[in-house]
Amino acid sequence: MTVQELWKEGNHILSEAGIEEAILDSRYLLEWVLQCNHSYLLLNPNSLVTMEQEQQYRTAILERKGHKPLQYIVGEQEFMGYSFLVNEHVLIPRQDTEILVETVLKHMQECMETASDCEKLQEDTEADTVYKILDMCCGSGCIGISLWKKINEKQQGMCQVIVSDISSEALEVTRENAKRLKADVEIIKSDLFQAIKGKFHILVSNPPYIPSKVVDTLMPEVREHEPRLALDGSPDGLFFYRNIIEQAKDYLEEEGYVFFEIGFDQAEDVRKIFVDAGFEQVMIKQDLAGLDRVIYAKLPAGKNHATSKQR
Ligand code: GLN
């Protein structure tokens, strides 16, 4: 069979099944099976594929026909310029979540600039601080690992990153990602703060935040293939924000920050939870579509439970 014939067949099956991006998906899967790029397909329509490739492609097309997301079929997704392994135990990293990472990076940049200003004025100041960052509900590890890489690329040893999740299967994926991206992050299995020790300058999380009833209305790619555990944020979607914010005081350094990804309509609810818990300087950021996507706030000095607990 030729490249062109196989592509046609794949496209036909996906179009018939009502897959929206049939042409693109069938092409992308063929590129993946043949390990080639788009121009190879265009320039070599009549070259022959092996039986093995034909079979692998048909299997992939059938999976896609069943609404399995492309990323789970090919096993990876790019995020912040890095390639992350994914399987059905972790959420597929979303482009919108890059805004969360970029917001934390910008904050870190400002911290570094302030620290180096201090260093010029007086020696032995915050300039030597190692920033401790906790990525809670880490899934594939895309947030924590990207932060570790971006920050350490700029300034080696500047930060220590701990990533945690309740799911052992998800943490296996995190571990693989940390290994292949050579990110020295600490990986902890924990139900929220249950196994977390110590204090952090930054707590970042993209927790499950979709209201339970809404999960069942999502597209089949998400509803039937992505882990419900990573999506369902309780009946009102706010369970994780409430819990993390309430307990954060025990785990934040003085003037520590909490950064969250949120759903487009959750900014005001989460702002209120922050304010009620004594946080200040609540900031909200929008995604490329102009929808509220990130919220963060600072725990003012004296508000954390600094020395009360021995951990
Ligand atoms: N932190 C991971 C991500 O943003 C997983 C999020 C989750 O499981 N809710 O992709």
Image: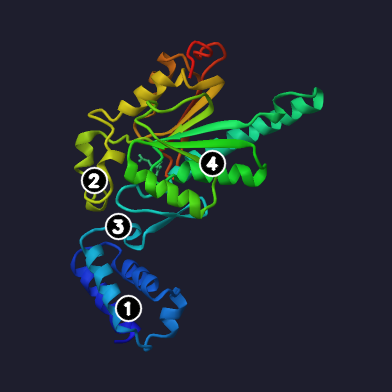
Which callout, 3 or 1, points to the residue nearer the camera?
1
At 77% from the left and 27% from the top, the residue drawn is: 119
Q: Pick the residue in front: 135 or 214.
A: 135
Q: Quadrant of residue 30?
A: bottom left
Q: Pick the residue in front: 197 or 106.
A: 197
At 19% from the left and 36% from the top, the residue drawn is: 213
Q: Which residue is mark 3?
A: 69
- Residue 265 vs 56, above or below: the answer is above
How far across and down, in percent of the image, does residue 104 sit? 54, 36
Q: Note whether ligand 1 is within 8 Å of mark 2.
A: no
Q: Amino acid at mark 2?
A: Leu
Q: CA distance from mark 2 to mark 1?
A: 33 Å
Of callouts 3 and 4, which one flags the residue occurring earlier in the amino acid sequence?
3
Tag 3 near tag 4, CB within 8 Å: no
Which callout, 2 or 1, points to the residue nearer the camera?
1
Q: CA distance from mark 3 to mark 1?
A: 20 Å
Q: Which residue is mark 2?
A: 218
Q: Which residue is mark 4?
A: 102
Tag 2 near tag 1, CB within 8 Å: no
